[in-house]
Image: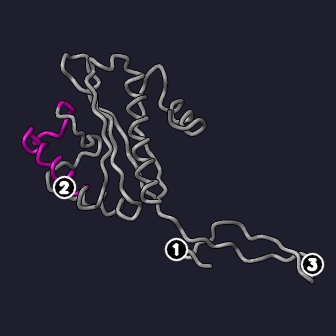
């Protein structure tokens, strides 16, 4: 069987025949595409009335490169050329000179439009910081919720996915949380 681009998925196998041990052809499988989830948080603040956001967007493997190219073109048109300053959705994050608040807002709206055009799915949890006062638990619970919703979405569409989560520094590191999720599952 020949898979996507005819790539072998494993080493050649050896089998017994009437002529002794012979090498068989490599095994080919259909290449399965994945949904990719990119997760990040925003809103770590102690200010009264502030919210903590944890979210991620999912894009199919097929659409990911086209989306990346479209976003890069939008950044270029807006004169956002500095690779050391990634586009952040928090308006308090630094941005290149010449990009004012209005231009920044318009650029974020364009990126969201492009994400929709490329059939991205948004998974987002928002909680008032005054309700979830323990920063480690707040982050962990929101990651659990986003991952659970992503998992349910994949199951409903009979797809496979991969989650890529931004790292952070805390008493309980992201690596520990993710390792626990893979070994014990979501709680």
At numbered mark 2, what does the secondary structure look like: helix, strand or loop?
helix
Q: Answer with the quarter of the image where residue 3 lies.
A: bottom right
Rendered view: 123 above or below 142: below
Label 3 belongs to which residue? Answer: 20
Residue furthest out toward the bottom: 18
Span highlighted in magenta in the image: 92-115
Q: Which mark is residue 113?
A: 2
In primary-sequence order, the first of circles 2 and 1 is 1
| Crowding at mark 3 (Cα within 10 Å: few <14, some 14-19, many 20+) | few
Main SS, magenta region, reads helix
At numbered mark 3, what does the secondary structure look like: helix, strand or loop?
strand
Q: CA distance from mark 3 to mark 2?
A: 62 Å
Label 1 belongs to which residue? Answer: 4
At numbered mark 1, what does the secondary structure look like: helix, strand or loop?
helix
| Crowding at mark 1 (Cα within 10 Å: few <14, some 14-19, many 20+) | few
Verify CB contact (< 8 Å) between mark 2 and mark 1.
no
> x, y percentage for residue 70?
25, 60
Residue 163 horizontal side relative to residue 43, left or right: right
In primary-sequence order, the first of circles 3 and 2 is 3
């Amino acid at each position: 069987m020949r898979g996507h681009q005819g790539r072998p998925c494993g080493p050649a196998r050896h089998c017994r025949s009437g002529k002794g041990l012979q090498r068989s052809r490599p095994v080919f499988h259909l290449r399965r595409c994945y949904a990719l989830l990119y997760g990040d948080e925003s809103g770590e603040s102690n200010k009264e009335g502030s919210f903590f956001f944890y979210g991620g967007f999912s894009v199919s493997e097929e659409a990911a490169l086209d989306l990346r190219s479209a976003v890069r073109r939008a950044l270029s048109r807006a004169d956002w050329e500095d690779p050391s300053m990634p586009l952040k959705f928090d308006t308090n994050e630094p941005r290149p000179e010449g990009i004012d608040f209005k231009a920044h807002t318009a650029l974020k709206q364009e990126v969201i439009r492009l994400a929709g055009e490329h059939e991205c799915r948004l998974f987002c949890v928002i909680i008032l910081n005054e309700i979830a006062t323990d920063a480690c638990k707040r982050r962990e619970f929101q990651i659990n919720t986003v991952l659970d919703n992503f998992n349910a979405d994949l199951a409903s569409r009979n797809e496979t996915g991969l989650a890529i989560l931004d790292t952070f520094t805390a008493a309980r590191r992201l690596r520990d949380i993710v390792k626990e999720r893979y070994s014990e599952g979501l709680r």
